[in-house]
Amino acid sequence: MKKQRPRVALMVESSRVYGRELLRGVALFARTRANWSLLHHEMTLDSGMPDWLRNANIAGVIARVDGNTVGPLRKLRVPIVDVRCDRAYPGIPQVETDNQRVAELAFGHLWERGFRRFAFCGFRFAAYSEARLSYFRQFASDAKCPLSEYRSEGRPNEPLTTIEKSGMLDVEGMSAWLSSLERPTGLFVCNDIRGQQVLNACQTLGLAVPDDIGVIGVDDNDTICQLCDPPLSSVRPDAASVGYRAAEILHAAMAGSSPEREIEYVPPTTVIERSSTRVIAVEDRELARVCRFIRQHACD
């Protein structure tokens, strides 16, 4: 009798580039290192646990775990690996992008372009945003550079997609903050979604990007980055390696092994530079205007 392949459920959104890369990494492991049957359906980041999963006879789960799904997932009584990492869940190993290294790459990129004043724009109560702010704040402090911070308000335990959408309604407060920034300032936004919101506000305010404000995001979502005006520079995470490592940990757990660490961090790969930071920052505002004019009209 042919042995049945282990069935592994993937509760990971395909609506975001990060989620799609996670799935790509899991699929690579399943093809090359294991003989899994992968179960997945279209979902968004904050989707609950699907009903079919309760009777799917699965051997393990890789999921973007949150407070609403952790209970139902535990009831399945199979190994779980979390690739969202909003908070710690006892007994559930986690694999996460190294947000310290993300902030370091963003700070270093802005520093190399001559910025010596910095700003951060994110979302309150979004765990990844708070982590990136904390590390970016430390890098600015170590360099003895001023840092201005702005986060849209939210509520604890609110769905992340709701928190991020709130930034679209926070135009007045964010615009007032952007207008108050000294020029030039290097601005790190918590992700590309926030970057698009910031660049739209800069365009409305008539702020010159990247001469007045250089903006860099996270995720390297090529669609969102190209929709921005100017196109958004971004730190590219290695989400495929996050997914691959999560699959390795799940494979070991399904064989009865316990992970050595509760959480593992995977460093991002690089910064993808686009027009939002393609500049050499200068303090003299008249010289900055001249440089901007030359850059815009050099080929006329």
Image (spheres, rainbow, N blue to C red):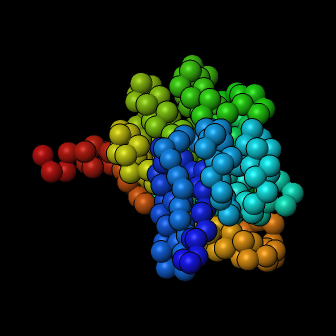
Task: Choose between 141 and 152: the one closer to the eye.
Answer: 152
Q: In this view, does 44 lie to the left or right of 65?
A: left
User: From the viewer's perspective, is residue 1 above or below residue 37?
Assistant: below
Quarter holding the N terminus is: bottom right
Looking at the rendered structure, the number of numbered marks drawn on it comes to: 0
Q: Which residue is found at the position 60% from the left and 56% from the top?
A: 9
Regarding residue 211, the answer to whether it shows in the image is no
Residue 33 picture location, percent across and down: 55, 80
Q: Which residue is found at the position 25% from the left and 45% from the top?
A: 296
In the picture as drawn, the residue positioned furthest to the right comes out as 90
Residue 241 picture location, percent across and down: 56, 70
Q: Which residue is found at the position 53% from the left and 25% from the top?
A: 168
Task: Choose between 216 and 63: the one closer to the eye.
Answer: 63
User: From the viewer's perspective, is residue 84 above or below residue 193?
Assistant: below
Q: In this view, does 250 lie to the left or right of 12?
A: right
User: From the viewer's perspective, is residue 14 above or below residue 138?
Assistant: above
Residue 151 picture location, percent across and down: 67, 34
Task: Choose between 139 and 37: the one closer to the eye.
Answer: 37
In the picture as drawn, the residue positioned furthest to the front comes out as 1
Q: In which quarter of the image is residue 72?
A: top right
Q: Quadrant of residue 163?
A: top right
Regarding residue 44, the answer to whether it shows in the image is yes
Residue 230 picture location, percent across and down: 36, 42
Q: Which residue is found at the position 60% from the left and 34% from the top?
A: 161
User: From the viewer's perspective, is residue 63 above or below residue 198?
Assistant: below
